[in-house]
């Protein structure tokens, strides 16, 4: 310590210079400026942290919102698919029913057409049978009963035969 108070020692002058430097810093308020700068920097960092925290919360809220919307969209898509399946099944059922009804109508029309054709064929066969029977009766009567009496009998037989066959 003896060396510190000796004015010829360099340590003494370093101590004096350092003391003057610290005194000037105090006089000009450098520690207050540095403190204010550090406080301002701390406030800036605190503000940035608060902003980052707020952004994070907003991002989490947005993520939750989009997750809910995605879930709702998925449920809606599932509902649309189920409705489409039900509608397709109903349409297929209606189509099968309409096809069955159409086939039944066509079958009925075909049966009616066949019945008409049968009736017409029976009618034609009867007409052919009547015609053949009349020719045969006419030939028989002409061969057995000649003259006007035969013609009268033939006409009477034809009229009676037509009434019985129709």
Image (tube, rainbow, N blue to C red):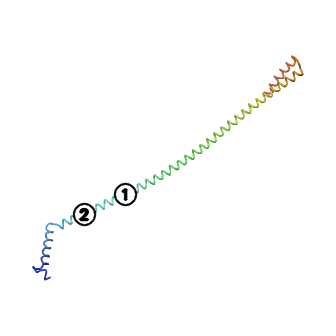
Furthest-right residue in this view: 144
Q: Quadrant of the C terminus?
A: top right
Which residue does the image show at 12% across and 76% down from the upper left?
13
- Quick check: 83 left or right of 38? right
- Quick check: 29 left or right of 69? left
Q: Which residue is mark 1?
A: 59
Furthest-top residue in this view: 148
The spot of residue 34 in percent (x, y) is 20, 66
Q: Are marks 2 and 1 in contact (CB under 8 Å)?
A: no
The spot of residue 132 in percent (x, y) is 81, 27
| Quadrant assignment, res 157 | top right
Q: CA distance from mark 2 to mark 1?
A: 26 Å
Query: Does residue 122 sit above or below 104 in this rendering?
Result: above
Which residue does the image show at 62% across and 41% down from the upper left?
99
Which residue does the image show at 37% across and 57% down from the upper left?
59
Query: Does residue 65 sit above or below 156 in this rendering?
Result: below
For label 2, count other residues whose C-alpha is less than 10 Å away and answer few (under 14), some (14-19) or many (20+). few
Q: Which mark is residue 4?
A: none
The spot of residue 117 in percent (x, y) is 72, 33
Which residue does the image show at 21% across and 64% down from the upper left?
37
Secondary element under disc 1, as helix, strand or loop, is helix
Query: Does residue 38 sit above or below 138 in this rendering?
Result: below
Q: Which mark is residue 41?
A: 2
- Quick check: 146 left or right of 72? right
């Amino acid at each position: 310590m003896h060396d510190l108070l000796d004015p010829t020692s360099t340590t003494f002058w370093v101590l004096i210079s350092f003391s003057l430097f610290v005194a000037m810093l105090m006089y000009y308020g450098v520690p207050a400026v540095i403190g204010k700068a550090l406080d301002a920097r701390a406030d800036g960092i605190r503000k940035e942290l608060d902003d980052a925290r707020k952004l994070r919360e907003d991002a989490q809220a947005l993520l939750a919102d989009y997750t809910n919307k995605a879930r709702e969209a998925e449920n809606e898509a599932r509902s649309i698919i189920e409705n489409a399946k039900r509608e397709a099944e109903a349409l297929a059922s209606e189509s099968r029913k309409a096809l069955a009804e159409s086939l039944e109508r066509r079958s009925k029309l075909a049966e009616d057409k066949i019945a008409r054709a049968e009736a017409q064929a029976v009618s034609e066969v009867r007409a052919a049978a009547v015609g053949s029977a009349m020719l045969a009766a006419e030939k028989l009567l002409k061969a057995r009963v000649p003259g006007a009496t035969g013609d009268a009998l033939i006409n009477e037989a034809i009229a009676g035969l037509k009434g019985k066959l129709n």
